[in-house]
Amino acid sequence: MPVIRFLREGRDVECYPGENLREVALREGIELYGLKGKLGNCGGCGQCITCFVDAEGAADLALTPRTSVEERKLRGRPQTWRLACQALVQQSLVVLTRPQVGLADRERALAAALAEPLPAGPTAWPEPPESQQDEEEEGGEAAAESAMDRGEAS
């Protein structure tokens, strides 16, 4: 699985290829938002621009390309900045949450995070397990056949 190394938080998190960066961060308890974002984020629609992340040093294909929403909303910001709600993770990468806040000794921390290898991960989602409903249907059919074998009417 691709790994997202959250620099500020000092955590590595696995995700599936194609997962939304914002959803992964929130699921894992990573704090994406400052006070303004906590009080009034758009829920992942790309309208409030409060889920900034910096993917500096990431491979070109680590995230999907910037969307047209990002191009408009992030005009004048560094090209490595992304809206987490608009970015899909394709490969392992290092991410700095809330880059507008800054990070003490950022360059050293980023260099150290990039120097430690990240696993490439698979390129596809795992096959889904058989659903419980399929198992229940198969169990019901087996019970009906058993009753018929014993000569019981349903």
Image (tube, rainbow, N blue to C red):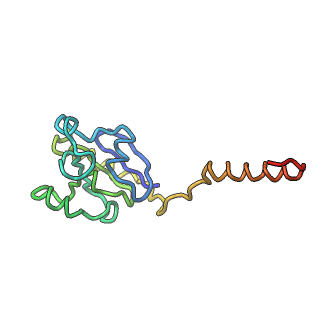
Report the side of 144 relative to 34 (left or right): right
Q: Position of residue 10 (x, y in %)?
A: 34, 40
Quarter of the image where one finds residue 74: bottom left
* Nearest the eye: 124 or 96: 124
At horizontal 60% and vertical 51% (from top left) the residue drawn is 131
User: Percent from the top left, x then y, of residue 92?
Assistant: 39, 56
Of residues 85 and 59, the one drawn nearer to the viewer in this rendering = 85
Instruction: Decide if residue 89 is on the left or right side of residue 35.
Output: right
- Coordinates of residue 25 in the picture (x, y in percent): 34, 44
Q: Which residue lies at the image location 62% right of the left edge and 54% below the top edge?
A: 130
- The extreme left residue here reads 76
Q: Residue furthest right?
A: 150
Query: Is 68 drawn above or below residue 136 in the view shown?
Result: below
Q: Position of residue 116 (x, y in %)?
A: 38, 50
Count of all numbered marks drawn on residues in the image: 0
Residue at 25%, 52% in the rendered image: 45
Asked if residue 65 is positioned above or below residue 78 in the image, the reply reads below
Instruction: Report the front residue among 74 and 117.
Output: 74
Residue at coordinates 41% horizontally, 54% vertically from top-left? Answer: 118
For residue 97, above or below residue 118: above
Pick whichever, 12 or 39, lies toward us: 39
